[in-house]
Amino acid sequence: MITPVLLLLLGLVLLYFGGEALVRGSSAMALRLGMTPLVVGLTVVAFGTSAPEMVVSVNAAFAGQGDIAIGNVIGSNILNIGMILGLTAVLCPLNVQVQILRIDTPIMIGATLVVTWMLMDQKISNTEGAFLAAGIVVYTVFTVFIARKLKSPVQAEAEHALGTPKPTWSPWRDVLFIGGGLALLAGGSHYLVDGAVTLARSFGISEAVIGLTIVSLGTSMPELVTCIVAGLKKEPDIALGNIIGSNIFNLLGILGVSSIVRPLVGDGIRTTDNYVALAFAVLLLPILWSGRRLQRWEGALLVLGYGVYVALLWPR
């Protein structure tokens, strides 16, 4: 019992320092490349912090553990909006850009709708997986294209000036921070998940519930740490972009690749779980539209909603 607890603690320490390094490196690199923090949050940071989910779900697919592979993604998306984005807003209210409202959040809702429809039979086939995987490629290209079309270099510079100082060190240091941060996040999530799953199974908890809660919490710790660090550093674009981008990547990239590896069967994942993920995605849009700012009390409501979901889930 001591070893799993030590793994949990080690994972948390690695995740904290990984999140700090990733936000620092990606923010600086974005300015050098003329990109805005929002684009970096939606792509580099979002995909990077979702790396643990990818590793866990692909490994679960290889092992024939469809409940963990699917539950990890659905649970992570619910947790990302409910607990992580909510907690970040409680600590530091987040301003919302128009691109998030008009483009990325609707895309997230659309991807959630597609996956909810695919999971009506509790399965995702190879063909459906290929369709999802193609979607993440299209989304990434589209995001970069739109950013370059809508933002001039002068606008990008001005946007960075609001919260990100111009980097004065070598670009290789940015690369080192990003690479090191991602490595620490992946390693920290690995240890955290190993410890959490070992503890959970010792208490006889089902794989579906493990995937929806403990595994999703463990693999989403990078998003949690990154968002909190970004919020405290006054980088709301990276925090919001991280969550929206991660959810899109989870649905399209991770479920897509995992089901290409092996068709996924999630008999323990109920339709209710999919509907909860869809409800959080849909409700986020009007919340972000209200004043174009995610307030502390709105964040508290999101956290409360996640708590209610978990409380109702555990008796299963």
Image (tube, rainbow, N blue to C red):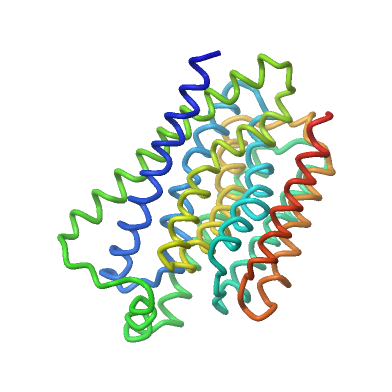
Residue at 24% x, 56% y is 174
Where residue 231 appears, x then y in whole percent? 48, 62
Residue at 73% x, 21% y is 205
The answer to whether residue 308 is above or below residue 196 is: below
Residue at 51% x, 58% y is 242
User: Quick one: 152 or 158, which is closer to the camera?
Assistant: 158
Where residue 167 appears, x then y in whole percent? 22, 67
Residue at 20% x, 54% y is 173
The answer to whether residue 261 is above or below residue 133 is: above
Image side of residue 110 versus residue 227, left or right: right
Where residue 305 appears, x then y in whole percent? 76, 53
Image side of residue 159 versus residue 76, left or right: left
Image side of residue 250 versus residue 176, left or right: right
- Quarter of the image where the C terminus is located: top right
Where residue 224 appears, x then y in whole percent? 52, 49
| Quarter-of-image position of residue 37 | bottom left
User: Quick one: 172 or 189, which is closer to the camera?
Assistant: 189
User: How many badges with numbers are in the image?
Assistant: 0
User: Quick one: 108 or 229, which is closer to the camera?
Assistant: 229
- Quarter of the image where the N terminus is located: top right
Image side of residue 6 versus residue 86, left or right: left
